[in-house]
Amino acid sequence: MSTQEPDIPLKLTRELKRIESFCPGYTLRRAQKTVSRLFEASFRGAQITSSQYAILLTLAINQPLSTGTLSVQLSSEVSTVTRNMQALEKLDLVMTRPGADKRFRHYHLTETGVHALEENLPRWKEAQKQTMSRVGKMRWMAMLGGLKSLYDE
């Protein structure tokens, strides 16, 4: 194992700087992590996380939803959604019911889930306000369409 720092070729350094400056993947990843930290901080001390709140929000607007449909709505893997939904079921925030096709479960909010949405809405709004203060409303409105085009089908 070498303890000496390698020389990074100038051509590679230039290419990496272009990625750092202009790459959507790099920039969006950094922005997402920053925004996630703001939302998680806002939910510190709550009984649910901001990620769980986002799932409950999606379910409230679109219920009932199957695991597959929910994974599309959340842009998550089915296995991740399944794990998250199991945790929310243990907290009595969601329940499952069989669909017309018994092989598929459909998720619904429980009364406890609705209460969690109501109770934590001020936390969500505070995180949203903090995020908007960093970006600015006009800039956000200009970016929103482009961002949604990445996941809207």
Image (tube, helix red, strand yellow):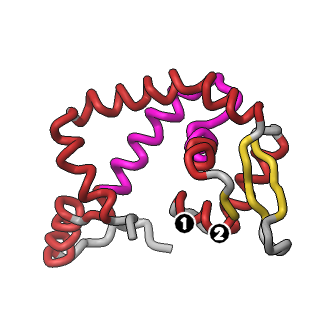
Q: Amino acid at mark 2?
A: Gly
SS type, badge 2:
helix
Q: Is residue 89 above or below residue 65?
A: above
Residue 84 image point, x, y percent: 71, 53
Q: Residue at x 61, y 47 (%)?
A: 55
95 on left or right of 67: right
Residue 127 image point, x, y percent: 43, 29
Q: Residue at x 18, y 73 (%)?
A: 15
Q: Which mark identifies residue 68?
A: 2
Q: Which residues are magenta?
A: 28-55
Residue 28 image point, x, y percent: 33, 56
Q: Amino acid at mark 1?
A: Val
142 within the magenta span = no
Q: Residue at x 79, y 64 (%)?
A: 105
99 on left or right of 57: right
SS type, badge 1:
helix
Q: Residues within 10 Å of mark 1 (few under 14, many from 20)?
A: some
Residue 69 quadrant: bottom right
Q: Residue at x 42, y 47 (%)?
A: 33
Q: Residues within 10 Å of mark 2 (few under 14, many from 20)?
A: some
Determine whether label 2 and label 1 are within 8 Å by CB. Answer: yes
111 on left or right of 119: right
Q: Is residue 72 above or below residue 38?
A: below
Q: Which mark identifies residue 131?
A: none
30 within the magenta span = yes
Residue annotated with mark 1: 72
Q: Which image quarter holds the C terminus?
A: bottom left
129 on left or right of 82: left
Outermost residue, front side:
100
Q: Main secondary structure of the magenta part?
A: helix
